Amino acid sequence: MDRRIERSRQMIMQAFIGLLEEQEFEKITIQGIADRANVNRGTVYLHFTDKYDLLEQSVETYLMMLVDSCLQEEGVSTELSRELLIRALTYLKEHVSIYRVLMTNKGIPTFRHRMTQFIKENITVVVNYMDLETGIQRDVMAQFLSISVTGLIEWWIIESMPYTPEEMVEQMTKILEARLQLW
């Protein structure tokens, strides 16, 4: 993609995230996005069909940026691991202004939902190797864990990250170990 086109898309998405921080999704207009991005309305429509398309593409773009940040090293598995979670939390911390808006904007649970789905897809690999002698179905365990991890990450962001990424992963590990022992 041409660098100018990519830059315009990026400016529009950043303007959109900035507006989401300030107002409800329903009140955001294409003209407002264009004004904030310092482009004309037509430029916004060249890249996105409407604000709903902009929302979907922003969610996918920022989710993929988060995922890519975790997989920077050659040969790193997408399987959920401590290292992967530390890289994810570190990236979230470095880009908190964007992800705080995406994770906590009550009018649009889209990002939170997609992130939960992504975690669930990857946690299912881990759950399939777990010895579940408790009678808990693997799909139920995967759903429970993915929602728990997403909720804990959201809490961490809302609370202004009171713990380092390493401490958070250590806490998550202890919680999982304690849960599995309780059952």
Image (spheres, rainbow, N blue to C red):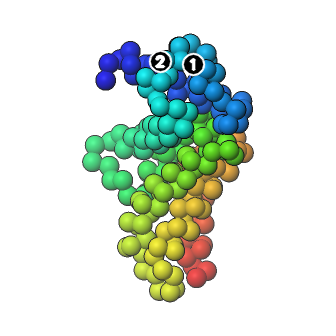
| Image quadrant in which the C terminus is located | bottom right
Q: Is residue 86 visible?
A: yes
Left or right of 128, for residue 165: right
Q: Using the image, determine if residue 182 lies above or below residue 148.
A: below
Residue 6 image-quadrant placement = top left
Q: Residue at x 50, y 22 (%)?
A: 44
Q: Secondary structure at mark 1?
A: helix
Left or right of 135, for residue 6: left
Q: Looking at numbered disc 1 in the image, what kind of residue is underneath it?
A: Ala
Separation (CA) of disc 2 from disc 1: 8 Å
Q: Using the image, determine if residue 126 lies above or below residue 5.
A: below
Residue 21 image position (x, y, % from top left): 68, 32
Residue 94 image position (x, y, % from top left): 55, 33
Q: Using the image, determine if residue 58 lies above or below residue 86.
A: above
Q: Looking at numbered disc 2 in the image, what kind of residue is underneath it?
A: Thr
Q: Is residue 173 visible?
A: no
| Image quadrant in which the N terminus is located | top left
Residue 175 image position (x, y, % from top left): 60, 66
Q: Which residue is mark 1?
A: 34
Lower position in the chain sequence, tag 2 or tag 1: 1
- Judge by depth and name the residue closer to the eye, 58 or 31: 31
Left or right of 169, for residue 157: right
Q: Residue at x 36, y 53 (%)?
A: 78
- Would you say the residues marked 2 and 1 are in contact, meaning their CB atoms lie under 8 Å apart? yes
The total number of labels drawn is 2
Q: Residue at x 59, y 25 (%)?
A: 30
- Judge by depth and name the residue closer to the eye, 123 or 5: 5
- Judge by depth and name the residue closer to the eye, 110 or 141: 110
Q: Secondary structure at mark 2?
A: helix
- Residue 68: which numbered mark, if any? none
Q: Which residue is mark 2?
A: 43
Residue 23 image position (x, y, % from top left): 72, 32
